[in-house]
Image (tube, rainbow, N blue to C red):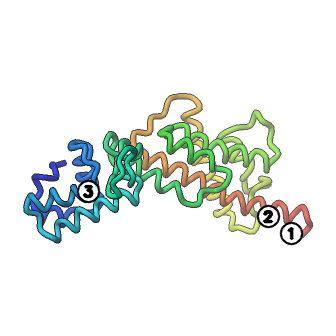
Amino acid sequence: MRELTTLSDDQVCSLPIDRLGQVVLAHFAETNEWNSRNFIIAAKSRGSSIQAQRCLAGAVNWLVARGLLAWGKPGQSASESIFITRLGQDALESGLQRVNAGERLQDDLHPLLAKVRSQFLLGEYELAAFAAMREVEIRVRDFAGADPSLVGVKLMRQAFRPDGGLLSDSSLDPGEQVGVMELFAGAIGVFKNPPSHRQVDYTDPIEASEVVFLADLLMRLLDSVESRLTAHVRGDNP
């Protein structure tokens, strides 16, 4: 990543906002800049065009909107004072992948996965992915009334088996019933079982977030299962 002062005006304005934001963030860290107004004045003094200055100001505001920079540096009274946040420090050390992955999980995760989000934001990717799938397993066991000794893939195949599984939807085509069973079994087999037996290292936080999203999908499918089971108990279903 090139230093900000080596970029031409055309390069500044042609960089995607996230790339320019990273360059600006690194510049703030390297120069200990704390005043956004002085930052733009310095760009002007280097001969930057009005358009380039606007692009740089936009990058500062993008960083603020993402929580990587924040207004009101402690100890400074100037309204233009700004500082690098803890999240910004993470981005400097690890890049934007962790930030982007964390932002994705800010959206409406299933309520039963709320605590997983906290683990993920702390950087505990393996634990978050494992915990998300474990919550799915726990819920399936509860719905199926299965013995605690029945775990993992065996539990999923037992609960969702087309020929009488308590959680299988008889209104679906047999092929779809098998598909649902294999979806749950495959997800648990790939993403829940391995961490139970060995260390799984998610070097890519985006990949770990996808595992959490898969657990979120399974939880929402289980919401439908719960509604169906409740209706059956009430006698709404044959």
Q: Mark 3 points at which residue?
A: 19
Mark 3 or 1, nearer chain start: 3
Task: Determine crowd level at label 3: few under 14, some 14-19, many 20+ residues with C-alpha closer than 10 A.
Answer: some
Image quadrant occupied by the C terminus? bottom right
Q: Label 3 sits on what residue type?
A: Arg
Task: State the mark number for residue 220.
Answer: none
Q: Do the residues labelled 2 and 1 touch (CB within 8 Å)?
A: yes
Q: Nearer the viewer, residue 8 or 48?
A: 48
The residue wearing badge 2 is 228
Judged from this view, the residue extending furthest toward the left is 47
From where the camera sits, is residue 190 visible? Answer: no
Q: Where is residue 212 in the image (x, y as percent from the top left)?
A: 55, 50
Q: Depth-wise, is mark 2 or mark 3 nearer the camera?
A: 3
> Label 1 amino acid?
Asn
For the residue marked with disc 2, what is the amino acid?
A: Arg
Secondary element type, mark 2 = helix
Observer-nearest residue: 29 or 214?
A: 29
